[in-house]
Image: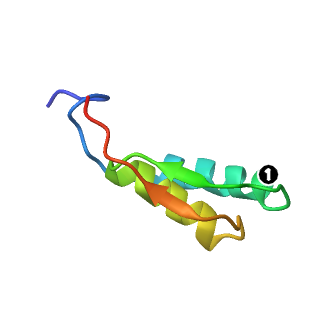
Amino acid sequence: MKKTKGRGVDTELNENGKVQAQKLANKLRNESIGLIVSSNLTRAKQTAQYLFDNGVTAPFKVFLFFF
């Protein structure tokens, strides 16, 4: 089985991605954030949602990006 990354692949956050999102949330929690912007890819939306759910307070907007 060939491992694929990047364009055209819409995957969920893996365990490493969740750890990275937690570290980012810890760093950004006390910052003044105007807007959390995400692409429409699942892992990007999950990361943005994870930040929001872990104390990073800002409006959340998903944009459609075509690659």
Q: Can see residue 52?
A: yes
So how many labels did they put on this image? Answer: 1
Residue that appears at 43% across and 49% down: 44
**Residue 64 placement, left or right of 1:** right
- Image point 30% across, 29% down: which residue? 5
In the rendered image, which quarter contains the N terminus? top left
- Residue 39 in the image: state x and y as whole percent: 40, 45
Tell me what residue is drawn at x 25 percent, y 34 percent: 66
- Judging from the image, the colouring scheme is rainbow
Vertical placement of residue 13 versus 59, above or below:
above
Q: Residue 67 appears at what percent x and percent y?
A: 26, 28
17 left or right of 51 in image: left
Horizontal side of 51 relative to 8 (left or right) equals right
Q: Mark 1 points at which residue?
A: 27
Please state the horizontal and vertical placement of residue 37, each as a whole percent of the image.
52, 50
- Tell me: 16 left or right of 10: right
10 Å crowding of disc 1: few (<14), some (14-19), many (20+): few
Q: Can residue 12 be seen in this view?
A: no
Q: Nearer the viewer, residue 48 or 66?
A: 66
Q: Quadrant of residue 2?
A: top left
- Considering only vertical position in the picture, is 30 above or below 65? below
User: Which quadrant of the view contains residue 32?
Assistant: bottom right
Residue at 61 percent across and 47 percent down: it is 20
Q: Which amino acid does label 1 sit on?
A: Lys
Helix, strand or loop status at disc 1: helix
Specify the farthest residue to the left. Answer: 1
Q: Decide which of 56, 20 is in the foreground and name it.
A: 56
Q: Position of residue 47 (x, y in %)?
A: 51, 55
